[in-house]
Image (cartoon, rainbow, N blue to C red):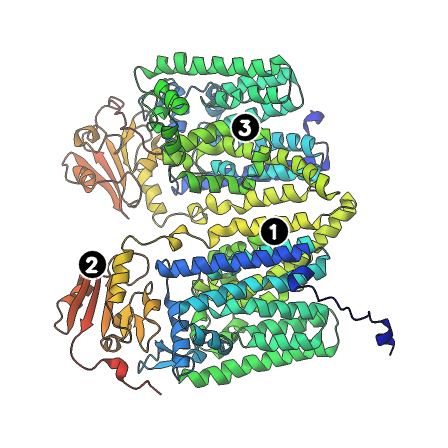
């Protein structure tokens, strides 16, 4: 009754539109997100159209969704067992169940373009929870918008627009809501977003567990401590020791190969890490690691992320990247640093607040936070050189020849091509890269068409005269296209293998 | 003496930073040179002009086979020469170079303290200068003399700012004794003084000093030592003309030529790399940016793309004055924001940002692998140790010049145009074939000219490094030097 008495009278005027209800800075943020999504979707599409970059991962996920729509969920034609060369599911490599949310959109607009768009959209929308977090911490809307923009341009994040299609790109928006509701102490929403975030990849539960540690340090109630840690650990155990091995069909987990200096199995790795800590320390301070950490934290002012507890959430991924001997994990523009970069950025917000308070104490009342936020934005933007090369968007000199070669290949046949091109052939039952001729020659011979780009000088394998002759002088293959050093060979004889029933 | 010591906490902090800076960069420069991981051609040139002047030749430039003053009319070398006479060697020159850069930091600190009225911000701006890519890189980019002038030019500005006329004049003259492009930067004091509505002597003095310096450099000293040799830098502007008159005419009256020079493909990336650490267009908000314009303009119109490499020595003045202009832009922007939004303070956050941006661009000029020995380093050292200190040497590739510049007769295969007759004039030959990617290349014929020559004995052949000695050793120092083909590098 009290509530009813205090509530305002129902107005007969129509409720103002959402846009009108937004504040000035919020409108600016909406404009920034809109521009960001349009620009980076455009860039990603252009990069794909001009064969500007490796397209292997785009091909993998495009093919996975294609197969999912065609009755074999999560199957990837190019992901094969080493023994029998049978395709296996993406779930064997990654516990990425969230793709089911993407599937309806893909069903409406099949092809890589929708994935590029959704990826740019997901990355752009991550600015919303980042804005909410910054606004909560700093109580300054302008600074919050500037910081959200800075986050959008942070190299580990912005690079993902051009780094093919990868699962972690869809994580930040969810993880940031986890952060936000953790800070807001809204338990139900915190758990809900955590649960959805877990579906992104197998490394996410480790990050969720760290929220429990954070809560423990903050001396929150037991539910904040126990549930993230226990649920995170249980989910991690389930996906790594039950679900993924089931889909792997006896294959080794590729992650185990990343720690070869410690051992070849999970048990061996943990045992050696515990028994030989000096080996770990030596590895941690290798030049690759030092350079990686500097590039990772430099756009955040080097030390700023390390003065607050949210950096705990970055630690598991950071530790994996540092301890791994796979240098790919230390490449900032690749997708191994999305989670790390996001958590470190949130941690930096706490440092920004401290800087603002320090300035107020030292220099008196004034509006300092937008200046600091502007500084971070400049720093983020200035590190474009870590992820952008104009060559990604430039047409190849033999662009037309490649397009003609692709057009010369029938739609549903199996094709082998270089990693730069293979995404074009991924919306079909079978495709793979030319590498298979080296690793699994018998499997390679089952493909109907082979596209050779002898101009390729960036992504191996490079086409040598000997390799070219292995088709050109081979009576089992017929040259059907030759233009500007781009060749298409058609395998003669035998029924086109794509008609074979898909493997069970 | 006490007055020379830093009086404030900020001053003491800066002094500590400068000591660390000098030690660090001096060590890095020596290490890079010692490990032979950098171009050493210019180290050889600069070292030799000092070394030769201690051994009977007047500041000899071995590459052009005439006095150094034919190319660069720098009286400042006389100031450094006594120090070199005391401690002859490349390391002395590295130390002088790093000291000059760090002294520029002191002057920037004084200017910033006066402009921003905040000690912490002043230290940060000094650091921004010291780590600005085009300046920090000069500590480890061979040996060049542009950085000697930098503290002098900034001192000119400081005394202009403090309206200390006597010292202003003194530093104008000192600076004009530096590289021949310095008077162009000094000339900017003319419009700047007019802009600031200073008395006539503030603009007349730099005008007179610059005019005299240019006349002395280009009409008297240069031609006297050149003996008909063409001023090399003019070749860099070949896209605009073949002589100074033609170049100026085209700049002033042929907009199409000027436009095509300004819009060369290399200029875009160059400008981005140069301006980004100074916060892109931020320096252009104030008139002080004019001081960066002369060198910037020359670099933009030149066809020599070496001048557009931020980490090379063509951007020292430009970089310093971009930082200086950023410094002056801070209070201006602060005033603008205050007018619109009320109380706001950009200090020390903006100086901190400029400083961080300067430091953060280290990937433009610092490559950690350059400070590690090459796999064949030990072999290089052993091979070079075989060659007597004063013996005439032919060496290859061209970048190895620094190691042989403490002698009167030495030349690279490039200088000898890989001509067998010219190369056979040298008693000792040092060939390091490990630099396949480096320009100019070493043709196999050059190696074979000695390997198959019965007059030469191979003393060393390991890890792609060869040392040959002429069997009947010719009388020392009777070999005429050969002059180089037109240089193409920095």
Question: Dividing the picture into quarters, in which one does residue B48 lie?
Answer: top left
Name the mark nearer the viewer: 3 or 2: 2
Comparing B464 with A65, the one in front is: A65
Discs 2/1, front: 2
Q: CA distance from mark 1 to mark 3?
A: 28 Å
Residue A154 percent across, percent down from the top left: 55, 56
Q: Is residue A96 above or below residue A173?
A: below
Q: Which mark is residue A483?
A: 2
Location of residue B71 with respect to A333 vertically, above or below: above
Is A316 on the left or on the right of A269, as rendered?
right
Q: Label 1's element? A: helix
Mark 3 falls on what kind of element? helix
Q: Estimate the spatial distance between the alpha carbons at disc 2 and disc 1, rounded to whole Å.
A: 49 Å
- Identity of the residue drawn at 66% across and 35% down: B332
Q: In this figure, which residue is indicated by the disc labeled 3?
A: B290
Q: Are marks 3 and 2 on the same chain?
A: no
Q: Is residue A280 shown to the viewer in this render?
A: no
Q: Residue at x 23, y 37 (%)?
A: B468
| Residue at x 27%, y 57% (from the top left corner) | A400
Relative horizontal placement of residue B223, taking residue A404 as reference (left or right): right
């Amino acid at each position: 009754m009290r509530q009813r008495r205090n509530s305002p009278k129902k107005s007969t005027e129509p409720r103002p539109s959402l846009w009108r209800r937004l504040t000035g800075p919020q409108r600016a943020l909406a404009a920034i997100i809109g521009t960001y999504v349009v620009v980076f979707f455009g860039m990603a599409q252009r990069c794909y159209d001009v064969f500007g970059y490796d397209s292997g991962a785009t091909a993998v996920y495009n093919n996975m969704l294609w197969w999912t729509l065609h009755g074999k969920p999560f199957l990837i034609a190019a992901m094969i067992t080493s023994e029998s060369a049978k395709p296996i599911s993406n779930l064997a490599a990654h516990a990425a169940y969230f793709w089911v949310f993407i599937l309806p959109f893909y069903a409406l607009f099949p092809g890589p373009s929708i994935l590029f768009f959704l990826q740019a959209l997901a990355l752009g929308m991550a600015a919303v929870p980042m804005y909410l977090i910054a606004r909560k911490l700093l109580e300054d809307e302008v600074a919050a918008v500037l910081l959200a923009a800075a986050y959008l341009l942070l190299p580990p994040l912005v690079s993902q627009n051009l780094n093919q299609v990868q699962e972690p790109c869809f994580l930040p928006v969810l993880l940031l809501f986890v952060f936000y509701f953790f800070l807001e102490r809204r338990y139900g929403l915190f758990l809900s977003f955590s649960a959805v975030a877990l579906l992104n990849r197998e490394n996410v539960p480790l990050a969720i567990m760290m929220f429990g540690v954070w809560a423990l340090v903050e001396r929150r109630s037991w539910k904040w401590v126990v549930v993230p840690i226990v649920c995170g650990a249980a989910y991690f155990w389930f996906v790594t020791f039950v679900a993924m091995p089931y889909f792997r069909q006896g294959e080794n987990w590729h992650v185990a190969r990343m720690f070869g200096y410690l051992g070849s199995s999970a048990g061996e790795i943990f045992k050696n890490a515990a028994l030989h800590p000096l080996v770990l320390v030596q590895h941690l301070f290798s030049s690759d690691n030092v350079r990686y950490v500097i590039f990772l934290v430099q756009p955040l002012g080097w030390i700023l992320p390390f003065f607050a507890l949210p950096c705990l959430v970055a630690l598991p991924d950071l530790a994996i990247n540092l301890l791994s001997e796979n240098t790919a994990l230390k490449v900032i523009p690749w997708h191994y640093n999305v989670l790390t970069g996001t958590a470190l950025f949130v941690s930096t917000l706490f440092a920004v607040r401290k800087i603002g308070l320090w300035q107020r104490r030292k220099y008196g009342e004034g509006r300092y936070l937008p200046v600091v936020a502007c500084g971070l934005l400049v720093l983020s933007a200035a590190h474009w050189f870590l992820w952008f090369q104009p060559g990604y968007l430039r047409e190849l000199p033999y662009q037309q020849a490649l397009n003609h070669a692709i057009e010369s290949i029938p739609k549903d046949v199996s094709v082998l091509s270089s990693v730069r091109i293979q995404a074009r052939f991924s919306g079909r039952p079978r495709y793979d890269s030319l590498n298979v001729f080296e690793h699994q020659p018998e499997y390679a011979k089952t493909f109907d068409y082979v596209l050779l780009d002898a101009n390729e000088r960036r992504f191996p394998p490079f086409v040598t005269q000997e390799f070219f002759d292995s088709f050109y002088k081979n009576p089992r293959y017929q040259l059907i296209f030759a233009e500007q050093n781009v060749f298409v060979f058609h395998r003669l004889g035998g029924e086109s293998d794509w008609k074979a029933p898909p493997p069970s | 003496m006490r007055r020379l010591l830093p009086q404030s906490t900020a001053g003491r902090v800066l002094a500590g930073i400068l000591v660390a800076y000098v030690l660090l960069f001096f060590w890095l420069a020596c290490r890079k040179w010692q490990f032979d991981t950098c171009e050493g051609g210019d180290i050889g040139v600069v070292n030799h002009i000092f070394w030769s002047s201690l051994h009977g030749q007047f500041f000899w430039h071995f590459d052009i086979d005439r006095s150094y003053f034919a190319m660069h009319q720098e009286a400042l070398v006389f100031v450094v020469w006594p120090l070199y006479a005391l401690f002859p060697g490349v390391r002395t020159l590295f130390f002088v170079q790093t000291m000059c850069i760090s002294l520029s930091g002191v002057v920037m600190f004084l200017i910033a303290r006066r402009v921003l009225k905040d000690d912490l911000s002043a230290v940060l701006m000094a650091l921004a200068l010291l780590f600005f890519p085009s300046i920090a890189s000069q500590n480890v980019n061979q040996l060049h003399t542009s950085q000697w002038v930098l503290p002098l030019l900034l001192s000119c500005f400081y005394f202009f700012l403090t309206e200390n006329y006597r010292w202003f004049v003194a530093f104008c003259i000192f600076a004009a004794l530096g590289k021949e492009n310095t008077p162009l930067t000094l000339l900017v004091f003319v419009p700047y003084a007019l802009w600031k509505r200073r008395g006539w002597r503030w603009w007349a003095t730099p005008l007179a000093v610059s005019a005299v310096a240019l006349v002395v450099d280009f009409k008297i000293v240069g031609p006297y030592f050149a003996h008909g040799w063409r001023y090399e830098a003019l070749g860099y502007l070949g896209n605009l003309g073949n002589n100074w008159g033609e170049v100026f005419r085209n700049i002033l009256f042929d907009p199409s030529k000027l436009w095509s020079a300004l819009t060369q493909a290399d200029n875009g990336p160059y400008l981005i790399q140069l301006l980004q650490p100074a916060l892109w267009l931020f320096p252009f908000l104030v008139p002080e940016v004019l001081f960066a314009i002369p060198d910037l303009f020359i670099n933009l119109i030149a066809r020599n793309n070496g001048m557009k490499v931020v980490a090379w020595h063509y951007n020292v003045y430009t970089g310093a004055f971009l930082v200086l202009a950023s410094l002056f832009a801070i209070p201006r922007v602060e005033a603008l924001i205050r007018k619109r939004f009320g109380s706001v303070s950009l200090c020390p956050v903006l100086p901190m940002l400029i400083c961080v941006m300067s430091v953060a661009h280290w990937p433009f000029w610092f490559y950690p692998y350059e400070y590690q020995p090459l796999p064949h380093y030990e072999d290089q050292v052993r091979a070079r140790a075989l060659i007597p200190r004063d013996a005439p040497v032919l060496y290859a590739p061209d970048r190895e010049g620094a190691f042989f510049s403490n002698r009167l007769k030495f030349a690279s295969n490039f200088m000898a145009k890989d001509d067998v007759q010219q190369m056979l004039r040298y008693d000792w030959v040092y060939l390091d074939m490990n630099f396949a990617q480096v320009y100019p290349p070493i043709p196999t014929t050059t190696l074979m000219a000695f390997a198959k020559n019965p007059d030469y004995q191979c003393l060393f052949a390991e890890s792609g490094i060869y040392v040959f000695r002429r069997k009947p050793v010719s009388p020392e120092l009777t070999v005429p030097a050969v002059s180089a083909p037109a240089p193409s590098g920095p």
